[in-house]
Amino acid sequence: MSYQIYFINQNKKITVDGGKLSAACELAGFPLNLVCGGNGTCGKCRVRIKGKADENFKEVLACQTEITEDMEICLKESDYRQETVVLTKAAPLNIELHPSVSKKYMNKDEIIEKMREKNTFFSQTEKVPLSVMQKFSMMNVSLDFTGCTFVYFNDEIIAVEKGDTTPYCYGVAADIGTTTAAVYIYNLNTGELIATKSALNKQTAYGADVITRNSCVRDNPEMLQRLRDCVIDTLNELLEEARSAYQDLKENIYHVVLCGNSTMQHLFYGMNPYFLGVNPFANIIKEEVVVTGREAGLCCNPNAVVEFLPLLGGFVGADTTSVLLTLTKKDKIYLMVDLGTNGELAVGTFPKFLAASTACGPALEGGNIACGMRGTNGAIEKVSFKNNQLTYKVIGEGTPQGLCGSAIIDAVAELRKAGLIDEAGTLLDPDECRRMNPYSPWIRYLHEAEEYNIAFYFTEGEHPVYISQKDIRQIQMAKSSICSGCLALLEEAGLTLESIDYLVLAGAFGNYIDIDNALSIGLLPPVSREKIISIGNGAGQGVQSFLLDQSYRVRAKNIANNCIHVSLAENKKFMESYIKNMNFSVEESL
């Protein structure tokens, strides 16, 4: 049976044959923020609807609401327009321009001369696809033929083009994150970065983390193609956006290098990530995967070389390989921490590393937090308790809509310093706070968010912003995963915190957090502050270097061949430390 769904604010009507309301929103072009993958646990898809028999609108979870009648739905733009601040900046590239792709023009006379000397044009030693030979054979007999351009990938000819097209030679480096994606487009002749584009990964409509998306495919195999389409569409929209300024771009992109975690690699290629989620937690393939632009479905030359950097094992993917490409001081010991929806860790000296991943969940990026949100306009990004005064900074300087990850870390740290959170992570209720200090300036901020769930309110009113006891528990689990993972990896490598030369923070979250606050709550192990450096989007830096300098291909292979993957799920030290590090006395748990 068919039903009419009318989107009031968008003045749009669609017809559906039942199903979930969230699916109808996606069909209409308004995908909601299904952080929990549609399991009804995150509460991020609340919308207001009215059926035929309803006098007033009522609030429901779209992912849990079956369509059984005609209805009106009131969607705010913020419900579906999930813009976010994407970190694309990293340390400056220190490389020599030596790309894998190059072009060579030969005029008609040079071609004839070569054929006369060799009695052939393509020699046995040259790697040439049949399609290129076919095209060349037809091209050079046309009446208007004056010459052609050969496109080389290393020593292989991948394309031939009529005329001199040598001025147009582009490459793309792409960092596919669980939450966001970024592309860097280069002129491979000059090494000039001509465009940087970024956007939310469209897969976020089906869950905030890789575990949720893996489960999504496991429960419904048809979702595999949909999730693949999501990431391909995300990248193509970014490439098309850049094409508006460079009309010759699409047909002249000959090399696309990608990095991302193991699930992103599987979904990009349409490979079922099922075995990543069950024992033995293995990849379909760890080595670099190379296909053509046509096979990948990307907006580039159909003969372009599209390759995903090698994975390192389990959930430790090509994004970690890419970060490790930037840590090249052979006499230094690195502890690398990439903070995101999935935490990747590595310790060692280039190119020999031990690497692991820890499922810290989406809490550090605002997921599974009552008022959590991504770093976009309206998100509180900084929190401070100074001189007994609450101050905060909002992205876009508008009305606060929620808390992004950096503010959540600040809030927990400040609440802890103010004595409002004890060592076990319990948030004081107003009566306890009053007993401890009748004149405390913080009493007025403490209220129940729901029964047995005390919260600290940053704003009140119709849409309050707060952090609750339940939220603090989510942060405790996330921070313990990271800290305990670091300690376990160090022990596995036979190293101590004192032997570390650098603790390297990579990723957007690591770039924006207050490092002192992260140390104070035990998100990071207690390393000397001067040893901690933040490199921003290290994955983006590494994948760009790989695109522009062939020597990074050798480095990537060295890392992949020498890196040892450690499964923390089977690591005794990790399991022992995890419970201890849930509290806020990290020094006592080491």
Image: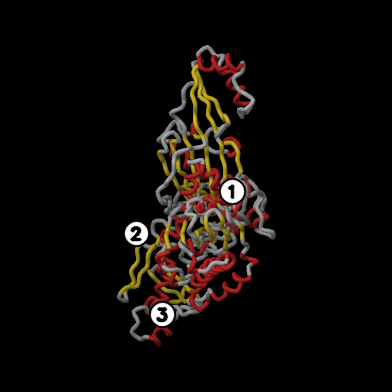
Spatial separation of the CA atoms under disc 2 and disc 1: 42 Å
| Mark carried by residue 18 | none
**Quick one: label 2, few (<14), some, or many (20+) residues within 10 Å?**
few
Quick one: label 1 or label 3, which is nearer the N terminus?
A: 1
**Quick one: label 3, few (<14), some, or many (20+) residues within 10 Å?**
some
Give the residue type at disc 3.
Answer: Gly
Q: Residue 178, position in %: x, y?
A: 53, 54
Spatial separation of the CA atoms under disc 1 and disc 3: 46 Å
Q: Nearer the viewer, mark 1 or mark 3?
A: 1
Q: Identify the residue at image location x=43%, y=28%.
A: 167
Q: Secondary structure at mark 1?
A: loop
Q: Identify the residue at image location x=43%, y=31%.
A: 247
Q: Is residue 211 above or below residue 479?
A: above
**Residue 524 left/right relative to 396:** right
Q: Secondary structure at mark 2?
A: loop
Does the image show residue 339?
no
Q: Nearer the viewer, mark 3 or mark 2?
A: 3
Q: Residue 187, position in %: x, y?
A: 43, 36
Q: Residue furthest top?
A: 143
Residue, disc 3: 419
Residue, disc 1: 310
